[in-house]
Image (tube, rainbow, N blue to C red):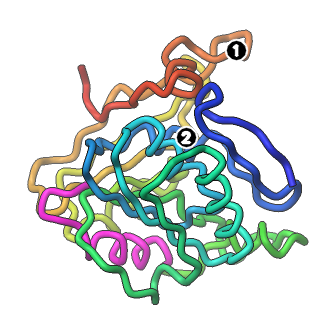
């Protein structure tokens, strides 16, 4: 096992020492969720809990459920929540597409598996399960996460930029309109490899592409905006202001 802290020590995070490991995506994804105190949030593929824990640390009083198919990771997530003294969170072992979900929820989010089914398989079983996307998985996850959302609730996904067309189609099929795209630029002037994509349950506004977030300075250190999110628990708003 490998232990660390997130958000400048606000979150204790133990995860497996090998196999699939959480990186920046769940922290940035959690920072983008517009949850308020008293609201209820659903996370798909919660792994060892980094995303939901970071959200709860930033927004006191939020409650949430994380769905993770690997029961060993669920045990770690529950332990991380206890060690971080974050209550109101429940982590459940099961298949997101088949598990009953007791709504309603105000927001849902996920960093879903996206590696192509025909790609080279990982020798690590846990990593393979976490990253490999069966055909139609993105649409199935979007539909499942959107179903228990309240009207005007949000669904936010972290995706490779190359999957933007598929992500937009998945949101539309899940009846989450008003799509917004927030690029995550590795450095200024570089193409975005990752995006955050949001839809609103029942939304009807046209698609918006936002300025996004530059993660690193030319020397590789975090930009001031990225550091504020990753270390100081600042929010990452979906807005152009």
Cα–Cα gap, marks 2 and 1: 17 Å
Image point (34%, 49%), residue name? 62
Magenta-drawn stretch contains 131: no
Which residue does the image show at 62% across and 78% down from the upper left?
69
* x then y, percent, for residue 30: 46, 44
Quadrant the N terminus occupies: bottom right
Say what secondary structure mark 1 lies in.
loop
Crowding near the residue tagged with mark 1, few <14, some 14–19, many ≥20 C-alpha atoms within 10 Å? few
Place residue 103 in its image quadrant: bottom left
Q: Is residue 174 visible?
A: no
Taking 37 as reference, is 182 left or right?
A: right
- Viewed as shown, does residue 206 lie left or right of 60? left
Which mark is first along the chain, 1 or 2? 2
User: Which label sits on residue 30?
Assistant: none
Considering depth in this image, is 91 or 28 the residue closer to the camera? 91
Residue 73 place in picture, x, y as percent: 70, 67
Image point 62% across, 62% down: which residue? 78
Residue 27, disc: 2
Label 2 CA crowd tier, 10 Å (few <14, some 14–19, many 20+): many
When the figure is inspected, residue 117 is found, relative to residue 89, above or below; the finding is: below
Q: Is residue 239 visible?
A: yes
Give the image location of residue 233, x and y in percent.
49, 28
Depth check, mark 2 against mark 1: the one in front is 2
The magenta region covers 137-154
Secondary structure beneath dot 2 equals helix
For label 1, the residue is: 221
In the rendered image, the vertical position of residue 179 relative to residue 189, given as above or below? below
Measuring from the top left, give residue 129's x and y in whole percent: 71, 75
Which residue is more in the foreground, 150 or 78?
Answer: 78
149 part of magenta stretch: yes
């Amino acid at each position: 096992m490998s232990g660390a802290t997130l958000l400048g020590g606000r979150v204790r995070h133990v995860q497996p020492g090998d196999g699939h490991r959480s990186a920046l995506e769940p922290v940035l994804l959690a920072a983008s969720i517009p949850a308020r105190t008293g609201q209820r949030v659903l996370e798909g593929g919660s792994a060892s809990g980094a995303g939901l824990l970071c959200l709860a640390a930033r927004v006191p009083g939020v409650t949430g459920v994380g769905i993770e198919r690997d029961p060993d990771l669920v045990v770690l997530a529950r332990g991380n929540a206890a060690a971080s003294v974050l209550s109101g969170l429940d982590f459940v072992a099961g298949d997101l597409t088949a598990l009953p979900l007791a709504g309603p929820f105000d927001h849902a989010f996920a960093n879903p598996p996206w590696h192509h089914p025909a790609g080279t398989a990982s020798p690590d079983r846990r990593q393979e399960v976490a990253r490999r996307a069966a055909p139609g998985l993105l649409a199935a996850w979007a539909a499942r996460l959107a179903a228990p959302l309240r009207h005007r609730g949000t669904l936010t996904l972290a995706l490779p930029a190359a999957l933007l067309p598929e992500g937009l189609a998945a949101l539309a099929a899940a009846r989450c309109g008003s799509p917004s795209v927030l690029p995550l630029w590795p450095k200024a002037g570089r193409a975005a490899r990752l995006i955050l994509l949001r839809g609103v349950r029942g939304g009807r506004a046209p698609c918006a592409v936002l300025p996004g977030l530059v993660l690193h300075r030319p020397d590789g250190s975090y930009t001031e905006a990225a550091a504020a999110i990753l270390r100081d628990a600042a929010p990452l708003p979906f807005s152009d202001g």
